[in-house]
């Protein structure tokens, strides 16, 4: 492990490289200031930001005048230009919230009223027969149509923000866990496993660990109640089951949206998430029982859903500030510390945090301007890593790439048609994230039907060559996740 001996003074230090920390880093990268991000994981989006529904919400679920509603609606309107600027895919496929009975129609009316109060455009309650014309597999008596809901791939968005922030001189320290924080004179001293740093302003964007960061420097006045949401991922051959997102009416007691059907950018369909309060905020395991429950609940929306359509399962954990006993809903806390100048806490950033991220970043930038002079850069670099996948290129484009470099012609991942050149590009990212997962999240190798059964060995060979490392040094996804622990048998002399 490299220990940094020199204290480096930054104007702003962000703790956490999830979508919130990365969106803030990106926003601040537009200004002439010195910014650093500390991320405990081996890559950005290694926490909740990689494991959610990937939905750009419209703003029909949060009470008017709440921060959730404000940041969700503002964030939603920022996504189209962000997608163009940063080159990540976004589809405005819209969503239906469906009613199964007369009581649930009242709930649709309530959501529509909230939506109107939050200035969400285009909301319509439609009769079940009309819904069936667009979504023949859905069973409902009526539905609320929400045209301004969209989908993205959440980790691609986070990676795009962070990589472009690096291109504009923000410093990201990966595998760097903040262990202690103190105020000294007019700045902060930030202790990490890689050494000590100084900063004038500190932003706590540590997601589920936000309370731990607060406790390092002042007394927290809240608890975090982790709530796990498991998902099933369906094989792409079932992509025609739905065209839009389909949600049940929300579960008010738990403050969650319920098991929904969500198409992904890459053509899979997600079923989930569940809602299960846990003591351990790191327990992202999936369970056989929950997989059965998810399938059952999804069948209440699509009765013909096949039994054997699932190719993978995953779980993300909500950062809830309301206990399972109290239930319900609490607002985001985006606030300056009451006792310590220059310290900003972002607390309880649960759903719709992905949608809200760009708007929260703007608000926090405004808060930082109380302490730091903010002058816009005039030479902002556009994102260089606009990758068009080989599988999405025309035959002519593919031939041209192979002519330039034959590695574009070597398919490594058969299911997703990912080439050797794409794996190498993924490994040479601006963040210098070099785990097996960082390859997977950048180019999709290993995400297809066989879930890496064919390509894992090839990716490992490429990683070994490109990183000049022995296989035993390669990591799966986190600082302590070796891909191999040793040889099963020695080669014959
Ligand atoms: C099941 C589920 C579904 C969801 N669906 C949606 C959706 O469809 N649309 C939507 O808008 N939102 C959705 N959300 C909400 C959204 O995912 C979150 O609001 C968002 O990802 C929170 O981002 P974050 O950056 O605050 O947290 P995280 O992504 O968890 O990032 C925090 C980071 O801080 C790092 N960290 C923690 N402690 C330290 C430390 N001491 N030192 C250094 N680094 C540290 C962690 O490693 C982590 O990477 C969903 C959430 C869940 C759980």
Image (cartoon, rainbow, N blue to C red):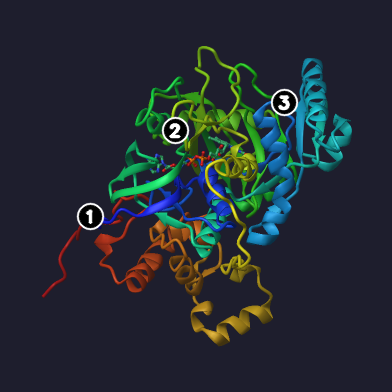
Residue pictured at 47% horizontal, 65% vertical: 430
Residue 397: % across, % down: 66, 79
Residue 31: % across, % down: 58, 56
Whether residue 222 is visible, yes or no, is yes
The local crowd at label 1, few if under 14, some if 14 to 19, many if 20 or more residues have their Cα within 10 Å, is few
Residue identifier under label 2: 210
Residue identifier under label 3: 65
Q: CA distance from mark 2 to mark 3?
A: 24 Å
| First of labels 2, 1 by sequence position | 2
With 59 as the anchor, is 210 left or right in this view? left
Identify the disc placed on residue 493: none
The local crowd at label 3, few if under 14, some if 14 to 19, many if 20 or more residues have their Cα within 10 Å, is few
With 412 as the anchor, is 298 left or right in this view? right
With 150 as the anchor, is 467 left or right in this view? left
Q: Is mark 2 within 8 Å of ligand 1?
A: yes
Dot 3: element: loop
Residue identifier under label 1: 485
Q: Residue furthest bottom?
A: 403
**Where's the N terminus, which quadrant?**
bottom left
Residue 296: % across, % down: 60, 29
| First of labels 3, 1 by sequence position | 3
Whether residue 287 is visible, yes or no, is no
| First of labels 2, 3 by sequence position | 3
Q: Where 278 sits versus 174, above or below?
A: above
Figure quadrant of residue 191: top left
Dot 1: element: loop
Dot 2: element: helix
With 97 as the anchor, is 181 left or right in this view? left
Q: Where 222 sits versus 374, above or below?
A: above
Q: Where 337 sits versus 369, above or below?
A: above
Looking at the rendered image, the disc whose residue lies closer to the viewer, 3 or 1, is: 3
Residue pictured at 55% horizontal, 86% vertical: 404
């Amino acid at each position: 492990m490299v220990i940094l001996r020199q204290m480096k003074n930054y104007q702003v230090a962000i703790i956490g490289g999830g979508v919130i920390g990365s969106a803030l880093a990106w926003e601040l990268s537009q200004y002439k200031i010195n910014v650093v991000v500390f991320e405990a994981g081996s890559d950005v989006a290694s926490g909740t930001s990689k494991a959610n529904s990937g939905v750009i919400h419209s703003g029909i679920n949060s009470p008017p005048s709440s921060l959730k509603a404000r940041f969700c609606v503002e964030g939603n309107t920022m996504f189209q230009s962000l997608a163009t600027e940063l080159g990540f895919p976004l589809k405005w496929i819209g969503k239906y919230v469906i009613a199964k009975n007369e009581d649930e129609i009242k709930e649709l009316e309530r959501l529509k009223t909230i939506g109107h109060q939050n200035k969400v455009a285009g909301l319509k309650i439609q009769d079940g027969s009309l819904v069936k014309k667009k979504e023949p597999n859905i069973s409902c008596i009526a539905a609320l149509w929400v045209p301004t809901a969209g989908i993205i791939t959440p980790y691609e968005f986070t990676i795009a923000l962070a990589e472009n922030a690096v291109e504009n001189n923000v410093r990201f320290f990966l595998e760097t866990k903040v262990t202690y924080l103190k105020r000294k004179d007019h700045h902060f001293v930030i202790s990490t496993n890689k050494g000590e740093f100084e900063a004038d302003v500190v932003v706590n964007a540590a997601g589920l660990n936000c309370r731990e960061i607060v406790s390092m420097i002042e007394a927290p006045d809240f608890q975090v109640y982790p709530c796990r949401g498991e998902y099933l991922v369906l094989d792409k051959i079932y992509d025609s089951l739905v065209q839009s997102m389909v949600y049940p009416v929300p579960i008010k007691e738990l403050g969650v949206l319920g098991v929904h059907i969500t198409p992904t950018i890459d053509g899979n369909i997600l079923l989930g998430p569940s809602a299960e309060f846990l003591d351990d905020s790191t327990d992202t395991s999936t369970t056989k029982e929950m997989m059965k429950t998810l399938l059952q609940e999804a069948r209440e929306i699509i009765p013909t859903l096949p039994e054997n359509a699932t190719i993978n399962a995953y779980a993300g954990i909500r950062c809830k500030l309301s206990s399972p006993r109290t239930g319900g809903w609490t607002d985001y806390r985006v606030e300056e510390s009451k006792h310590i100048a220059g310290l900003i806490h972002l607390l309880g950033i649960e759903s719709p945090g992905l949608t809200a991220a760009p708007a929260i970043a703007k608000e926090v930038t405004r808060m930082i301007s109380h302490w730091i002079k903010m002058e816009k850069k005039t030479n902002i670099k556009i994102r260089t890593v606009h990758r068009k996948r080989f599988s999405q290129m025309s035959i002519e484009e593919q031939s041209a790439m192979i002519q330039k470099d034959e590695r574009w012609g070597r398919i490594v991942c058969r299911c997703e048609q990912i080439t050797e050149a794409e794996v190498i590009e993924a490994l040479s990212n601006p963040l210098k994230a070099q785990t097996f997962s960082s390859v997977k999240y950048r180019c999709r190798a290993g995400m297809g039907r066989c879930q890496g059964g064919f390509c894992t060995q090839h990716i490992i060979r490429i990683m070994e060559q490109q990183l000049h490392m022995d296989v035993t040094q390669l990591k799966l996804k986190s600082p302590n996740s070796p891909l191999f622990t040793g040889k099963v048998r020695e080669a014959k002399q």
